[in-house]
Image (tube, helix red, strand yellow):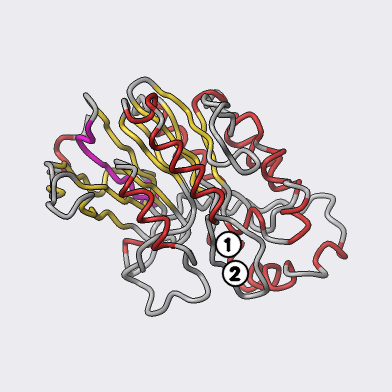
Amino acid sequence: MRLAHISDLHVLDLKGIKPWRFLNKRVTGGLNLLLGRSKIHRPELLELALAKIEALGCDHIAVTGDVSNLALESEFRRVKELLAGPIAAHKLSVVAGNHDRYTLGSVLTRRFDVAFEALIQTDLPQLPSVHGWPYVKLLGDVALIGLNTAVAQPIAVSGGRVGHKQLEALQHVLKHPDVEARYSVVMMHHHMFKPANKKREFPRGLSDRKEVLEVLLEGKADLVIHGHNHYYSTRTHPRSSNGSGVMVVCEAGSTTIARAHKDPNRDGKFNTYDIEHGRLSQVTTYRFVSGPGFVPWRRWGFDNRTPIRLPLALEQ
């Protein structure tokens, strides 16, 4: 199976939005957009990425949050239009980011969940959940688990939390026979480890990261994919004290960043994960380059413990 991973789309659409909708936390988000953020994220890059993903023959696409800027209905509609172009709904899964639950109102109305209801349905409805989270999709020999880390936060705080009840539900999910028999991929928005380009974490990290990591390792999760940092990273974490087996943790970055950076880790990207016979064989990261579009940038293979850099000449 080949799984594609896109994230942090930050699609902006203010059609029909009244000015008083900005009389809350959106006032800071609106200022950021005016100061240039609206020019950094380009929806046409999402279209290019989806076309490339389709050409690569990916079986499913995981979207790890921040699909919107301000959690507005108009933005969610636009995202659905963009995603629905070349990709069938049954090939898409999505989780919310902090921008998708930007205000208390968007959380109380479960605006994200309603908008993307068709993409967050579980194949194991008998398992416990918190308003449908986590959900599970059984995709051949892969179990894809959608975890919610996005909660309403005060102004200038972008951190997340899974919460005790959802963690208990996740424990049940990871122990379910239909999940244990498959390669497990957990998708969420926030990260568990401090990114290399950040000197401090508060107020933007996952507040219960230690508890989340413990549950994932005890449940023998195989791969964790996330977003939030707009920064590329691939790392491994031992799943036991004797080093037998590892959990791989990956972030591609933001897919829609069009502006070139001095640090290539911050350019627009998406990942693909090749999972064969119950193991991750390789991770390929595609980077946006003006002109050719998304091109292979890095590729890793995996043995039991260590990621191995592979030559890009293996591109199919």
Which residue appears at 34% of the width and 28% of the height?
56
Question: In the rendered image of this protein, does residue 36 appear above or below residue 251?
Answer: below
Which residue appears at 34% of the width and 57% of the height?
232
Does the magenta segment cover residue 280? yes
Image location of residue 87, percent across then percent down: 52, 26
Task: Classify the position of the N terminus by image quarter.
Answer: top left
Within 10 Å of disc 2 (Cα), the crowding (few <14, some 14-19, many 20+) is few
Q: Visible in this render: residue 267?
A: yes
SS assignment for the magenta stretch, majority: strand
Displayed quadrant of residue 28? bottom right
Which residue appears at 86% of the width and 64% of the height?
19
Q: Please report the bounds of the magenta region as a residue range.
A: 279-291
Image location of residue 35, percent across then percent down: 63, 74
Left-right relation of 41 to 16: left
The residue type indicated by label 2 comes to Gly
Residue that mark 1 sits on: 39
Which residue appears at 27% of the width and 32% of the height?
274
Left-right relation of 288 to 152: left
Residue that mark 2 sits on: 36
Q: Which mark is residue 27?
A: none
Does the magenta segment cover residue 221? no
Secondary structure of the residue carrying numbered label 1: helix
Left-right relation of 308 to 111: left
Residue closer to the observer: 29 or 263: 29
Task: Classify the position of the C terminus by image quarter.
Answer: top left
Residue closer to the observer: 156 or 162: 162
The residue type indicated by label 1 comes to Lys
Q: Visible in this render: residue 86?
A: no
Image location of residue 239, percent across then percent down: 23, 49
* Cα–Cα gap, marks 2 and 1: 5 Å
Question: In the rendered image of this protein, does residue 253 appear above or below residue 302?
Answer: below
Residue closer to the observer: 145 or 302: 145
